[in-house]
Structure formats: structure tokens, C-alpha cells
Image (cartoon, rainbow, N blue to C red):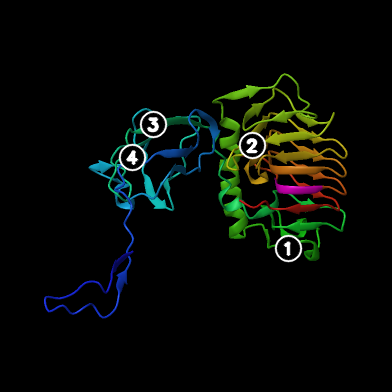
Amino acid sequence: TTQITTGVRDLAGNALAAIKSWSFTTGAEPDTTAPQITSVYPINGAQDIGCKEAITVTFDEDMDSATIFQTTPKVTFTLTGPGLTPVAGVVTYVDKIAKFTPGSDLADNTLFTATIDTQAKDLAGNQLATAKVWTFTTGQSEPVLGRSSSFALMASTAISGVAGSEINGDVGVSPAALTSITLTKSEINGNIYSATDQPIVDAITDLRVAYDTAKAKATNVETLATKDLGGKTFYPGLYKTGDSFDITSGDLTLDARGNENSVFIFQMPTTLTVAVGRKVILINNAKASNIYWQVGSSATLNTTTVFKGNIMANVSITVNGGSNVEGRLLAAAGTGGSGAVVFNTSIITIPVP
């Protein structure tokens, strides 16, 4: 605050009539500190990252969004892999966070390198002191269900069961006729398709591609010595057996390690059997939509089971009473596969993506 008192006089000796005072505030010292990166996602060295992930960088202060871009010849935020191959995508910046969104799914089982270079500046024009470079590796990519994704139950010969079920999703059978579906309409919260209806024909086409894709996967596969998955915990990845898989001796836990886009794939040349009352338990952001069971023959879920994931069975699928399924039951899934779905007094709900 500054003040001039009445003691001030002009050349004729006249005093200032009133005290004059006013105030002002000084500005901050110029910002000369380089911005810093406080976190990145995925973290450096992360494994089994989902192929649909966006890559993010968080700064310690507001940045000049015009300096964070992926436009040649000046590129600030880049993603490469495999090797030095650039990944096409879109870079955005909001509230201290820069995000790189790939233009398509990342390749699975691949090492990627992300870079933020020193062209990135804060609002005062200070550049990042050093470039930030880190790597991560993707996990398994999901088989794409495509037009079959709206179906809770699919088969080629018949869909039947004891009355009293709740089916939240479409139901379809082909090439069999509508009369081969003996569930009542009141049980089905979705559309019903049969024979040559285009939606079921298209769905079967996409399902068989997804089944064959899941069956053919062989990179980073873990072959399990025991067929009983009960009482065990598995992390994202590709698992196979030379015979069948059972969930018998206890519940099965699937742990996504905090990554909701992580994928679990189980390959079996013969059957899948879930014992009475057994559960598939999802923890740490694991999602039923990202779990795939590629069954070489038939699957059976016994009474009061709680099951998660998409069963793609080459032959048939049977669900016994009192069971609850978050997923899809897709029979006759393989090329040339043929079979039915039997769904007895149970509940099935298509999982959220």
C-alpha cells in the first residue's frame, strides 16, 4: 500500500486536501522450472497389457496443449512397436494428462515403446528437461465375436430346457427351424432368430471365425499339467490342456491385476465340466466379457454353478438348474461344428463390454 499525506504542498504552499492511498499486488516470479512427468500408464515394464489400452502421461503442472501432438514433422508423443514401427493414433491433452489412443487394437504379445520428447512445454514455455521413454508388453488379444456378441444362446440343432429360466440376450438356432427352440418367449429378454434369418446366419459366420482364432492361438501359451482348475488363481493369458478342463476341487479365481482390458483364454480339445455349486470368481477388475473358453467338444455346467465368460463349444452346451451365467453360451462354434444348448431353470446375462 502506498500513501501520500496532506503534508505535501504545491509551490504556492497549498497542502494536499486529503490523504491519497492505493495498493497493488506484485506478480509471481517468472516460472523457469521445467515440467516433470509424475506417472505413466502402462507403467514401465508392465506385462499382459490389454490390446485396447490407451497410453497416458500425467504432468506435475498445466502444459501447453499445442506442444503435445503426434503430427509430423514434429512429434511429441509417440508409440512404436514391434521394433521402431510407428503406431497410428490420436493424441489428446486434458487437465495435465496427455493420452495416446491407438487407431486400432495393438498387436498382442508385443513389446511397445512410448516416448514423450522434450518439445512438450508448460504454459511458461519451459520444455521437459529430458525425454521420457518407457516400454510395456501386450497380452493376448481377444477373439472377436462380432455379430454373435448380442446372443446369449446359440446352437445349430436345438435350444431347449426346463421352464423358468431368465435369458438376457438374443437366442438363435441355425440351420434348424424356429420349432427347435422350446424355451418360452417370456423367458427371453431379447430377439429370437432361426433357420435362415440373417442375424443368426451372420452371427454363426462371425462365431466360427472367433472360435478358430481362439483355437489357433499359440504364442505365450501355458500348458497346464492338471486339468482341474478348481482352487486355483490364474492371471491374464492363454492356457491350454491336452485333454479337458474341469472346475471340481474348488472355485476358480481369475485375477486381472487391476487391468480391466486383460484377456483370459482357455483352450481344451475335449470337454469343460463345472461341478455342482462351483464358481468362477473375478477379482481386480477382471471382466466376464474378456474370458473365452474354447471347447473342442461339449461343456456342462452342473447345478447351482456361478460361471463367467464366453463358452464357444464345437458341439453342445448344457446348463443345469439354479445356475447363473454372466457370459455367452455359443454351441456349434467350430467350422463344421454341430450341437445344441440345454438351459435348465437358470439365468444368463450378456456381460458388459
Q: CA distance from mark 2 to mark 1?
A: 30 Å
Q: Nearer the viewer, residue 206 or 246?
A: 246
- Which of pointers 2 and 1 lies earlier in the amino acid sequence? 1
- Which residue type carries mark 2? Ala
Which element is circle 3 on? strand
Check disc 2 and report the residue beneath it. 256
Residue drawn 30% across the image and 37% down it = 118
Q: CA distance from mark 4 to mark 2?
A: 36 Å
Check disc 1 and report the residue beneath it. 189
- Which residue type carries mark 4? Ala
- Which of pointers 1 and 3 lies earlier in the amino acid sequence? 3
Which disc, if any, is residue 34?
4
Give the magenta-colored segment's residue range: 324-329
- In the depicted structure, whether residue 122 falls above or below residue 10: above
Whether residue 25 is visible here, answered yes or no, is yes
- Which of pointers 3 and 2 lies earlier in the amino acid sequence? 3
Tell me whether circle 4 and circle 1 mark residues in contact (CB < 8 Å): no
Name, please, the residue furthest toward the front: 13
Chief secondary structure of the magenta span?
strand
Left or right: residue 167 versus residue 98 is right
Which element is circle 1 on? loop
Q: Nearer the viewer, mark 3 or mark 2?
A: 3
Q: Nearer the viewer, residue 239 or 58?
A: 58
The quadrant the N terminus occupies is: bottom left
Which disc, if any, is residue 133?
3
Which element is circle 2 on? loop
- Which of pointers 4 and 2 lies earlier in the amino acid sequence? 4
Q: Give how far across and how far down residue 157 sits, in percent.
A: 73, 49
